[in-house]
Amino acid sequence: MIKIIFRISILFFLNYGVIEQSRNINVYQLFLDLEFLRVMNKFNELLIHLIISISVTLLTLFLIYFFRPFIEIYLLHFLKFNFYFLINLISISTIFIVFRVYGYSRFYLLIYLFVASIFLYKSEGLFSK
Protein backbone atom coordinates (compact mmCIF):
# COMPACT_ATOMS: atom_id res chain seq x y z
CA MET A 1 0.00 0.00 0.00
CA ILE A 2 2.84 2.37 0.83
CA LYS A 3 4.49 1.52 -2.48
CA ILE A 4 1.34 2.43 -4.43
CA ILE A 5 0.87 5.73 -2.59
CA PHE A 6 4.56 6.54 -3.05
CA ARG A 7 4.36 5.80 -6.77
CA ILE A 8 1.15 7.78 -7.23
CA SER A 9 2.53 10.84 -5.47
CA ILE A 10 5.88 10.88 -7.28
CA LEU A 11 4.37 10.26 -10.73
CA PHE A 12 1.71 12.88 -10.06
CA PHE A 13 4.28 15.54 -9.12
CA LEU A 14 6.50 14.66 -12.07
CA ASN A 15 3.60 14.97 -14.48
CA TYR A 16 2.33 18.14 -12.86
CA GLY A 17 5.84 19.56 -13.23
CA VAL A 18 5.78 18.87 -16.98
CA ILE A 19 2.47 20.69 -17.29
CA GLU A 20 3.56 23.65 -15.17
CA GLN A 21 6.93 24.02 -16.92
CA SER A 22 5.34 24.06 -20.37
CA ARG A 23 4.89 27.71 -21.24
CA ASN A 24 2.54 27.31 -24.18
CA ILE A 25 0.31 24.55 -22.83
CA ASN A 26 -3.30 24.77 -23.93
CA VAL A 27 -5.91 22.87 -21.93
CA TYR A 28 -8.90 24.94 -22.97
CA GLN A 29 -10.24 22.16 -25.23
CA LEU A 30 -10.60 19.89 -22.20
CA PHE A 31 -12.50 22.64 -20.40
CA LEU A 32 -14.86 22.97 -23.35
CA ASP A 33 -15.50 19.22 -23.27
CA LEU A 34 -16.12 19.28 -19.52
CA GLU A 35 -18.35 22.33 -19.88
CA PHE A 36 -20.36 20.54 -22.57
CA LEU A 37 -20.85 17.60 -20.20
CA ARG A 38 -21.86 20.10 -17.49
CA VAL A 39 -19.02 19.02 -15.21
CA MET A 40 -17.39 22.46 -14.99
CA ASN A 41 -18.98 25.88 -15.27
CA LYS A 42 -15.97 28.13 -14.82
CA PHE A 43 -12.53 27.76 -16.38
CA ASN A 44 -10.12 26.71 -13.64
CA GLU A 45 -6.71 25.95 -15.11
CA LEU A 46 -5.33 24.49 -11.88
CA LEU A 47 -8.16 21.97 -11.61
CA ILE A 48 -7.71 20.91 -15.23
CA HIS A 49 -3.95 20.47 -14.67
CA LEU A 50 -4.72 18.31 -11.63
CA ILE A 51 -7.19 16.20 -13.63
CA ILE A 52 -4.64 15.62 -16.38
CA SER A 53 -1.85 14.78 -13.93
CA ILE A 54 -3.88 12.30 -11.92
CA SER A 55 -5.24 10.73 -15.12
CA VAL A 56 -1.75 10.08 -16.48
CA THR A 57 -0.64 8.69 -13.11
CA LEU A 58 -3.59 6.34 -12.73
CA LEU A 59 -3.38 5.13 -16.32
CA THR A 60 0.35 4.45 -15.91
CA LEU A 61 -0.18 2.36 -12.79
CA PHE A 62 -3.16 0.57 -14.34
CA LEU A 63 -1.15 -0.35 -17.45
CA ILE A 64 1.72 -1.65 -15.30
CA TYR A 65 -0.74 -3.76 -13.32
CA PHE A 66 -2.58 -4.95 -16.44
CA PHE A 67 0.46 -5.88 -18.56
CA ARG A 68 2.51 -7.47 -15.78
CA PRO A 69 1.11 -11.01 -16.26
CA PHE A 70 1.57 -10.86 -20.02
CA ILE A 71 5.25 -10.08 -20.16
CA GLU A 72 7.73 -12.90 -20.15
CA ILE A 73 10.38 -13.54 -17.54
CA TYR A 74 13.15 -12.31 -19.82
CA LEU A 75 11.40 -9.00 -20.35
CA LEU A 76 10.64 -8.64 -16.68
CA HIS A 77 14.26 -9.02 -15.58
CA PHE A 78 16.38 -7.72 -18.45
CA LEU A 79 14.28 -5.08 -20.19
CA LYS A 80 12.29 -3.76 -17.24
CA PHE A 81 13.39 -0.15 -17.86
CA ASN A 82 12.16 -0.37 -21.47
CA PHE A 83 8.87 -1.77 -20.22
CA TYR A 84 8.38 1.17 -17.85
CA PHE A 85 9.46 3.65 -20.53
CA LEU A 86 6.89 2.20 -22.94
CA ILE A 87 4.15 2.26 -20.31
CA ASN A 88 4.93 5.90 -19.47
CA LEU A 89 4.97 6.84 -23.14
CA ILE A 90 1.66 5.11 -23.83
CA SER A 91 -0.09 6.60 -20.83
CA ILE A 92 1.06 10.20 -21.26
CA SER A 93 0.46 10.24 -25.02
CA THR A 94 -2.96 8.64 -24.62
CA ILE A 95 -4.12 11.13 -22.01
CA PHE A 96 -2.69 14.12 -23.88
CA ILE A 97 -4.39 13.01 -27.11
CA VAL A 98 -7.73 12.14 -25.54
CA PHE A 99 -7.84 15.31 -23.43
CA ARG A 100 -6.54 17.37 -26.37
CA VAL A 101 -3.63 18.95 -24.53
CA TYR A 102 -1.54 21.10 -26.87
CA GLY A 103 1.61 23.16 -26.51
CA TYR A 104 3.42 21.04 -23.94
CA SER A 105 7.19 21.16 -23.83
CA ARG A 106 8.70 18.15 -25.60
CA PHE A 107 11.94 18.63 -23.69
CA TYR A 108 10.23 18.38 -20.30
CA LEU A 109 8.16 15.49 -21.61
CA LEU A 110 11.34 13.56 -22.48
CA ILE A 111 12.78 14.35 -19.07
CA TYR A 112 9.54 13.09 -17.52
CA LEU A 113 9.70 9.85 -19.50
CA PHE A 114 13.26 9.08 -18.41
CA VAL A 115 12.87 10.18 -14.78
CA ALA A 116 9.52 8.38 -14.33
CA SER A 117 10.91 5.22 -15.93
CA ILE A 118 13.98 5.28 -13.70
CA PHE A 119 11.78 5.95 -10.68
CA LEU A 120 9.45 3.02 -11.47
CA TYR A 121 12.43 0.76 -12.15
CA LYS A 122 14.16 1.65 -8.89
CA SER A 123 10.97 1.67 -6.78
CA GLU A 124 10.15 -1.90 -7.86
CA GLY A 125 12.65 -3.34 -5.43
CA LEU A 126 12.45 -0.56 -2.87
CA PHE A 127 9.51 -1.90 -0.89
CA SER A 128 9.89 -5.59 -1.67
CA LYS A 129 12.63 -6.14 0.94
Image (cartoon, rainbow, N blue to C red):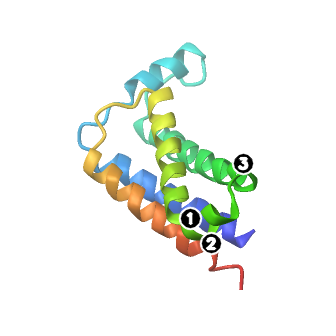
Q: Of 9 and 90, which appears nearest the observer?
A: 90
Q: Which image quadrant for residue 96?
A: top left
Give the CA distance from mark 1 to mark 2.
Answer: 10 Å
Name the side, left or right, on which 88 lies relative to 125. Answer: left
What quarter of the picture does the N terminus occupy? bottom right
Q: Which mark is residue 80?
A: 1
Q: Earlier in the sequence, mark 1 or mark 2?
A: 1
Give the CA distance from mark 1 to mark 3.
Answer: 15 Å
Vertical relation: 35 (above or below) 76:
above
Q: Earlier in the sequence, mark 2 or mark 3?
A: 3
Q: Of 3 and 47, which appears nearest the observer?
A: 3
Residue located at (48% from left, 55% from top):
85
Give the CA distance from mark 2 to mark 3.
Answer: 16 Å
For residue 99, say whether it is visible.
no
Q: Of 116 and 76, which appears nearest the observer?
A: 76
Residue holding disc 3: 66
Q: Which image quadrant for residue 25?
A: top left
Asked whether the residues under the numbered discs 1 and 2 touch, taking CB atoms below 8 Å apart as contact, a structural biologist would say yes
Residue count near mark 2 (Cα–Cα under 10 Å), binned few <14, some 14–19, many ≥20? few
Callout 3 amino acid: Phe
Residue holding disc 2: 124
